[in-house]
């Protein structure tokens, strides 16, 4: 495994030297003693792994109000965070779906095939049989009492399979740009207003924050987490970044109206949320059409903020890069400075960060391969802050199957120069 050159020198260089070592906007200046007293600081009372807090602080100081003169001319550095299992512990979209199923808030589609271009014929027949046709299209399904319907919906969401184990989706899609079961979730909210979905998500949020850590719930015959928490360290990091002049974004593969219900609790407003956003009809109701990116048209989930899509949405919405170029890695001055995520869905966004790419370790292959290889020296690995995982006993299969190709087949994880990353041991974990 390569050592992290940045980590080896952080304790030995001044802030002025750091501006040379870390790719950064031009015209950096080391903070003076007077400026240093005003530099926003990460809380010393919150526990981070190793020297991660200190390394993040160095990057904040170099790019933020203490060391970046360009801020005086309105050019703000950018930070972006995945949401589920990064800002919060546990998946908030699952919580919202569970609440909606328990309270009969899913409206029956005229045809289940309208919800996804990849839904199999068997899946359509199964959903039609399980959920019935007695309820008129556009009216609420009785999922609180119809366990069969709830089970099929949640099985497709969580496993991309039917309850009988058969695949729910088939066909072709770009696995670096979308995942059918992720794209399917916002379709379940079609017919509602965004405000209604946000209100449902706020209710599920209140219940999840009140539930004790470790609590579970039943959704049909499935068992799901019932609790969620904001990670205190991440909330603190967002607070400090904003005080230091950073523009802070959420870049999530979740449903936008659901994510909107949570972000205020971390100090991020709706205008800084990138997520799956469905188009609205003339009545302001959610349709089955989702926003496209990078020259790709609106569709039913063919592209979304997922893996390379997270880069596309950032490039287009934050840096003004449009058309096919939005899918490409940009020059350092048009990239985020700090990125944070926990899964392979976040790997491109976090890897684009010029100052620090923070990974919360959930044992996901590609992102952990890149983080442990640490090419460029900007990757930071931290155990999950709440209920962290123990050490992964086997090596990450970086040299063979750690990467997912656009056609969904596995392959080796490669650096930007094309060289293959060797298999990596899990060295940052609980215990």
Image: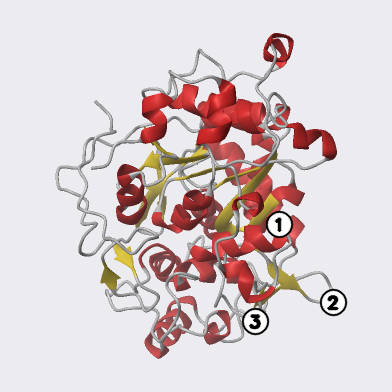
Q: Is residue 350 above or below residue 149?
A: above
**Which secondary structure lies at badge 1?**
loop
- Residue that badge 2 annotates: 282
Instruction: Looking at the image, tell me whether mark 3 or mark 1 is earlier in sequence order.
Output: 3
In this image, 247 relative to 10: left or right? Answer: right
Near-viewer residue (233 or 399): 399
- Residue that badge 1 annotates: 319
Q: Do the residues labelled 2 and 3 touch (CB within 8 Å)?
A: no
Pinpoint residue 427: horizontal percent, then vertical percent: 24, 35
**Which secondary structure lies at badge 2?**
loop
Circle 1 residues within 10 Å: few <14, some 14–19, many ≥20: some
The CA distance from mark 3 to mark 1 is: 41 Å
Near-viewer residue (73 or 113): 73
In this image, 381 relative to 131: left or right? Answer: left
Pinpoint residue 74: horizontal percent, then vertical percent: 82, 40
Pinpoint residue 307: horizontal percent, then vertical percent: 48, 62
Q: Do the residues labelled 3 and 1 touch (CB within 8 Å)?
A: no
Q: Quadrant of the C terminus?
A: top left
In this image, 310 relative to 403: left or right? Answer: right
Residue located 71% across and 55% down the image: 318
Near-viewer residue (181 or 53): 53
Q: In which quarter of the image is the N terminus?
A: top left
In this image, 300 relative to 420: left or right? Answer: right
Residue reaching furthest left?
Answer: 394
- Residue that badge 3 annotates: 137
Which image quadrant is residue 324 in?
bottom right
Residue located 26% across and 69% down the image: 411
Q: In this view, does 144 lie above or below 381?
A: below
Which image quadrant is residue 213 in?
top left
């Amino acid at each position: 495994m390569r050592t992290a050159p940045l980590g080896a020198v952080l304790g030995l260089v001044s802030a002025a030297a750091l501006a040379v070592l870390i790719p950064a906007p031009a015209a950096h200046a080391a903070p003076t003693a007077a400026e240093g007293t005003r530099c926003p600081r990460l809380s010393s009372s919150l526990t981070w792994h190793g020297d991660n807090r200190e390394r993040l602080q160095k990057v904040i100081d170099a790019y933020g109000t203490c060391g970046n003169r360009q801020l005086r001319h309105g050019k703000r550095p950018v930070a972006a965070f995945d949401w589920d299992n990064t800002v919060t512990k546990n998946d908030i979209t699952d919580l919202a779906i569970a609440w909606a199923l328990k309270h009969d808030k899913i409206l029956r589609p005229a045809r289940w095939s309208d919800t996804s271009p990849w839904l199999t014929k068997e899946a359509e027949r199964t959903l039609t049989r399980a959920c019935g046709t007695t309820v008129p299209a556009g009216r609420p399904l009785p999922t609180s009492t119809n366990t069969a319907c709830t089970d099929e919906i949640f099985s497709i969401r969580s496993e991309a399979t039917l309850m009988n184990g058969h695949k729910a989706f088939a066909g072709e899609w770009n696995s670096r740009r979308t995942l059918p079961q992720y794209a399917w979730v916002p379709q379940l909210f079609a017919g509602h207003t965004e405000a209604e979905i946000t209100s449902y998500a706020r209710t599920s949020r209140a219940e999840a924050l009140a539930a004790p850590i470790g609590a579970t719930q039943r959704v049909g015959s499935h068992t799901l987490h019932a609790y969620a928490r904001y990670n205190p360290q991440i909330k603190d990091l967002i607070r400090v970044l904003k005080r230091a002049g950073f523009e802070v974004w959420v870049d999530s593969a979740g449903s936008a109206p659901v994510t909107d219900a949570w972000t205020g609790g971390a100090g991020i407003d709706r205008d800084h949320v990138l997520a799956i956003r469905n188009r609205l009809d003339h009545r302001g109701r959610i349709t089955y059409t989702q926003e496209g990116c990078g020259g790709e048209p609106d569709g039913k989930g063919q592209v979304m903020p997922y893996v390379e899509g997270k880069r596309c949405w950032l490039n287009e919405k934050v840096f003004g890069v449009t058309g096919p170029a939005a899918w490409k890695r940009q020059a350092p001055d048009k990239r985020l400075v700090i990125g944070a995520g926990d899964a392979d869905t976040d790997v491109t966004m976090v890897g684009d960060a010029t100052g620090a790419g923070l990974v919360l370790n959930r044992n996901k292959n590609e992102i952990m391969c890149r983080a442990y290889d640490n090419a460029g020296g900007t990757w930071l690995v931290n155990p999950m802050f709440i209920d962290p995982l123990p050490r992964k006993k086997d090596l990450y299969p970086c040299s063979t199957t750690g990467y997912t190709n656009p056609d969904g087949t596995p392959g080796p994880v490669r650096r930007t120069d094309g060289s293959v990353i060797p298999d990596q041991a899990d060295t940052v974990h609980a215990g």
